[in-house]
Image (cartoon, grey):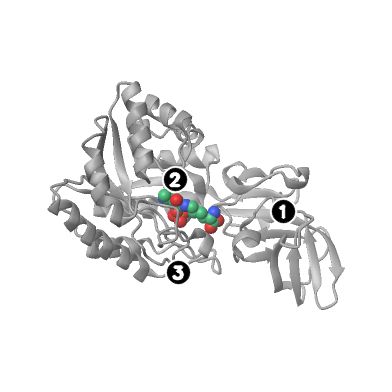
Amino acid sequence: MINKITTDKFSKIETPFYYYDLDLLRSTLNVIKKEADNSGYKIHYAVKANSNPRILKIIAGYGFGADCVSFNEIDAAIVAGFNASDIVFAGVGKTDKDINAALNTGIYCFNCESIPEMEVINQLATAQNKSALIALRINPYIEAHTHKYITTGIEESKFGINTWELDDVIKKLSDFKNIRLIGIHFHIGSQITRMSVFKSLCARINELQVWFSSHNINLEIINVGGGLGIDYENPETNPDFPGYFSLLNEFIDLYPGQELHIEPGRSIVGQCGSLISKVLFIKNGSNTLFAIIDAGMTDLIRPALYQAHHKIENLTSAGNILRYDVVGPVCESSDTFAKFIELPETKRGDIIAIRSAGAYGEVMAMRYNLRDLPKAVFSDDL
Ligand code: LLP
């Protein structure tokens, strides 16, 4: 929680930085673990959402697996304490170097997105005299009703194997002696807040299950990916894990012995992180007041890239409410965190919290304008 005591401590730390409330992270993990254990589902945390070593270590401590998209992520996960045998490797463009390293490390499974990829994994596994487990990522053609840049399961998406290719996939599989199909995988997008979208996914999975069993293919794993959204307007509200798990329970027909896997990222780490910044200047615009802060799009790119909304709080001031455009210092007009939002009267030196920035915040930071990368500060250390 960010209270007066934390704010006083923030004022002594160089800004901008990411602040992680680790108690909040642990309580979120307790909730999702309980839900997963009750339903018998297996969680692979999507490392791309936040790969800070300290965060990874805490998540690994809950016994979850990891969903990785590069060998560097696999390596970071293993260093943090995830078991290699609980790691799935996803991504539409895996390099030979990464595939080789993953085979060598003995990860659990490759989530394959195309026939050419299956061919390469088979080739490289043969060369290493190994057999690789694979799951097919299938494009289920479901509109996720989220931002178009994080919509991944519609017809024009680059992700997943098209259903009209499945006959071909099955034929090819018998030629690929060093890969073994164990399951099917889906991921239709991120920051999904309409539960009906997941219900449609379940229906599609049930249809595909019928198709696979009619081809005498026994699937051990159904992986529904990630995507559960969080409430950016209310940073204190928990993600709807109970609703999500009970929907999966109700609408997916698992066959005897099948495991259900999920790959949550944002819903685990989103809310525990805030980007903390200081106000540099207040500047008059023609129709607005600009609060120019020392954090920029280089620290948190989500508003610039996805027009994402993050709740912004002035932790210092309790003055009269005015309206501000909260902007960063970077030489781009898209370096805007929010327009015309209400804040208590804000002045130079005030501390600003940009909330719900734990997912896809620090990991997407960059050094444009040769700015320093933001540091991370943890509640346990304050
Ligand atoms: N599984 C796969 C295969 C994925 O591609 C992703 C996210 C996840 C799981 C985790 O999804 P989550 O539970 O976090 O929604 N940078 C964007 C989000 C990109 C998500 C990419 N894939 C943002 O800031 O909104």
For discs 1 and 3, the disc positioned in front in the rendered view = 3
For discs 3 and 2, the disc positioned in front in the rendered view = 2
Q: Is residue 317 visible?
A: no
Q: Is residue 183 above or below residue 206?
A: above
Frontmost residue, 342 versus 147: 147
* Residue 17 point in image, percent of width and height: 68, 48
Kindly indicate the quadrant of the structure image that contains residue 162.
bottom left
Q: Identify residue type, mark 2.
A: Val
* Residue 88 point in image, percent of width and height: 37, 40
Tell me the CA gap for discs 3 and 2.
22 Å
- Check the picture and name the quadrant holding the C terminus: top right
Judge from the rendering whether residue 107 lies leftward or rightward of residue 27; answer left or right: left
Kindly indicate the quadrant of the structure image that contains residue 380.
top right
Earlier in the chain: of badge 3 and badge 2, it is 2
Q: Identify residue type, mark 3.
A: His
Tell me the CA gap for discs 2 and 1.
45 Å
Tag 2 near tag 1, CB within 8 Å? no
Q: Identify residue type, mark 1.
A: Asp
* Residue 316 point in image, percent of width and height: 74, 62
Mark 3 secondary-structure assignment: loop
Q: Which residue is mark 3?
A: 145
Mark 1 secondary-structure assignment: helix
Q: Which residue is mark 2?
A: 92
Q: Is residue 251 above or below residue 85?
A: below
Tell me the CA gap for discs 1 and 3.
40 Å
Earlier in the chain: of badge 2 and badge 1, it is 1
Frontmost residue, 43 versus 27: 43
Q: Which residue is mark 1?
A: 8
Mark 3, Cα crowd under 10 Å, few <14 / some 14-19 / many 20+, is some
